[in-house]
């Protein structure tokens, strides 16, 4: 599976939007872009995924660059419950390859 | 609606002991997975199963065995535990294997080998 690059950590103020970037310059044409998050002492939780077009769901939005070499996870209004490690993953088969992710801190 | 349930949640073993971790899912998923997560790291795939009666090796299979006798259950065994196997173990399941299907994770088993 192709690799992704994410910042180690980010901070956001509560109730403000958060943009979490991910670079994946070696993405193949069939790789889906998945985002998961992991709250402390819990298992990873699916957030959103997409292939080429931008995607929205109740949790977040996913903006995918036209060349698909980067993507951004958007949390529209950060809450304290959104403090977690966010993983950007390229999925080309059954396997999800987790990197170290971005640790998001939310400041009250 | 339990989703993916892992038992036990915590366990301490002595080097050389054996144990089995149980994963159960109630979503009728075909695919099931076992991962391990070491401190400050992402998850690494140990073994996976594409259906009842089938298993396959993942990225880090050495020292572990698995069985999928029933569709809803996926067992991870440590025959002779070693300190290097101290980790948090996560089980996951998905409906099918295609890359556009999300995986659903349990809350983990925290295992310490002394």
Image: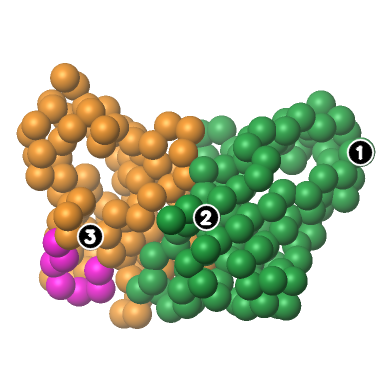
Chain colours: A orange, B green
> Which label's residue is closer to the chain start, 2 or 1?
2
Local SS, label 2: strand
Dots 2, 3 in contact, CB < 8 A? no
Q: Residue at x 73, y 78 (%)?
A: B53
* Marks 2 & 1 on one chain: yes
Local SS, label 1: loop
- The nearer-to-camera label among 3 and 1 is 1
- Quarter holding the C terminus of chain A? top left
* Marks 2 & 3 on one chain: no
- Per the image, the residue denoted by label 3 is A70
Give the x, y percent position of residue B40. 51, 34
Local packing at callout 3 (Cα closer than 10 Å; few below 14, some 14-19, many 20+) is some
Give the x, y percent position of residue A104. 28, 33
The residue lying toward the viewer, choosing from A22 and B19, is B19
Task: Please count the marks in the image.
Answer: 3
- The nearer-to-camera label among 2 and 1 is 2
């Amino acid at each position: 599976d192709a690799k992704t690059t994410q910042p180690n950590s980010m901070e956001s103020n509560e109730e403000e939007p958060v943009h979490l970037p991910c670079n994946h310059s070696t993405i193949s044409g069939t790789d889906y872009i998945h985002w998961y998050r992991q709250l402390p002492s819990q298992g990873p939780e699916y957030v959103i995924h997409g292939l080429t077009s931008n995607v929205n769901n109740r949790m977040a939005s996913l903006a995918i660059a036209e060349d698909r070499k980067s993507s951004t996870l958007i949390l529209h209004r950060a809450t304290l419950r959104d403090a977690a490690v966010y993983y950007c993953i390229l999925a080309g088969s059954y396997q999800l390859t987790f990197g170290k992710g971005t640790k998001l801190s939310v400041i009250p | 609606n339990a989703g993916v349930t892992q038992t036990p949640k915590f366990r301490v073993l002595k080097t050389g002991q054996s144990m089995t971790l149980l994963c159960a899912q109630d979503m009728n998923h075909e695919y099931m997975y076992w991962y391990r997560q070491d401190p400050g790291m992402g998850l690494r795939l140990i073994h996976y199963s594409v259906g009842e009666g089938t298993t396959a090796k993942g990225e880090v299979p050495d020292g572990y065995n698995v069985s999928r006798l029933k569709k809803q259950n996926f067992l991870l065994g440590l025959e002779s535990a070693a300190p290097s196997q101290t980790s948090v173990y996560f089980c996951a399941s998905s409906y099918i294997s295609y890359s556009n299907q999300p995986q659903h994770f349990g809350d983990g088993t925290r295992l310490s080998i002394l």
